[in-house]
Image (tube, rainbow, N blue to C red):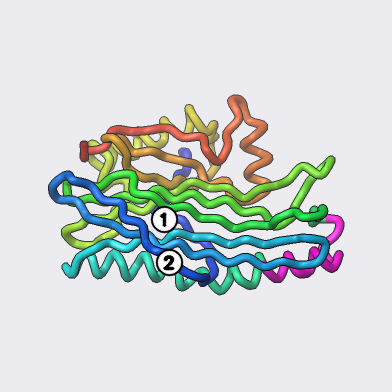
Amino acid sequence: MKKLIVASALAVTMLTGLATSPKVQASSTAKSAKVTFKQYKKTKTYKNGLKADFSYNLPKLKGNSAAVKKINKELLGYYKAANTNASKELFAFASDSAKGRNLPIAFIIKNCTYFDITKISVSYNKNNIISFKVYRNAWSGYYVGNKERVYSQIIAGWTYSLKSGKRLNITDVAKGDKASVQKKLSAGVTKYFGIKKGETITVHYFLKNGKVYLYPDLSKLNQKYTYAHRNPPVYYNSYFTVESRYK
């Protein structure tokens, strides 16, 4: 029996920075939400021109309903809970690398930039459902072989009910009952991600254009190597879709 873990959110480590003027992303469709974003960014410079950049665009729904307040609290909570870790990990590692302390695992050249970037966008916003696509790309100087850079990239999502403020699972939004949805997911990870008997994979999702988009969590280096050498190869941006009950 194949094991499948379905995750509806991405855990990220972030750092509090300076906010710029918010951008507005809204939908004219009924039963949708207006969303603003605040861009947080901080840069530090070290020896030999080494830099470290952190950026994150935090979404916030407009409105005073209990559901909106609940969603905003959770979105802000993700950010606050993780930002201290990013500060320690990204900037401390960059500082040590500039002093030569992380060799040979860390790659440093003149004027190179370490970074931790999270980009969040609204992928679905109607029928009292809002879904966010989350893309994170980070590099802290790691390299392999002939100094090939090893990035940490992942695509994930958060999906909420605008009525209750509850974060939704795949079985809440995919078309069909729980058993039929599980069958589709098992078939999908087998066909597109090459999951074999006894293996476990975490799958993230978001809604878009009446479909549920599912991406693999390949956050560990050994996972990246293993899945990249499958036939066909599987990468952080590999995906498959199942039909959503929300069009």
Residue placed most toward the observer, 38 or 141? 38
Relative to 10, is 229 on the left or the right? right
In reply to whether residue 93 is colored magenta, the answer given is yes
- In the image, is residue 178 above or below residue 40? above
Residue 62 x, y percent position in the rendering? 24, 63
Would residue 5 be visible to someone looking at this image? no
Residue 115 x, y percent position in the rendering? 63, 57
Q: Which mark is residue 78?
A: 2
Residue type at mark 2: give it. Answer: Tyr
* Residue that badge 1 annotates: 9
Are the residues tagged 1 and 2 within 8 Å (C-beta)? yes
Q: Which mark is residue 242?
A: none
Crowdedness of circle 2 by 10 Å Cα count: few (<14), some, many (20+)? some
Residue at 83 percent of width and 42 percent of height: 145
Q: Nearer the viewer, mark 1 or mark 2?
A: 2
Would residue 38 be visible to someone looking at this image? yes
Q: Secondary structure at mark 1?
A: loop
Residue 2 x, y percent position in the rendering? 47, 39
Relative to 1, is 24 on the left or the right? left
Residue type at mark 1: give it. Answer: Ala
Q: Secondary structure at mark 2?
A: helix
Q: Specify the segment rendered in magenta.
A: 91-104
Tag count: 2
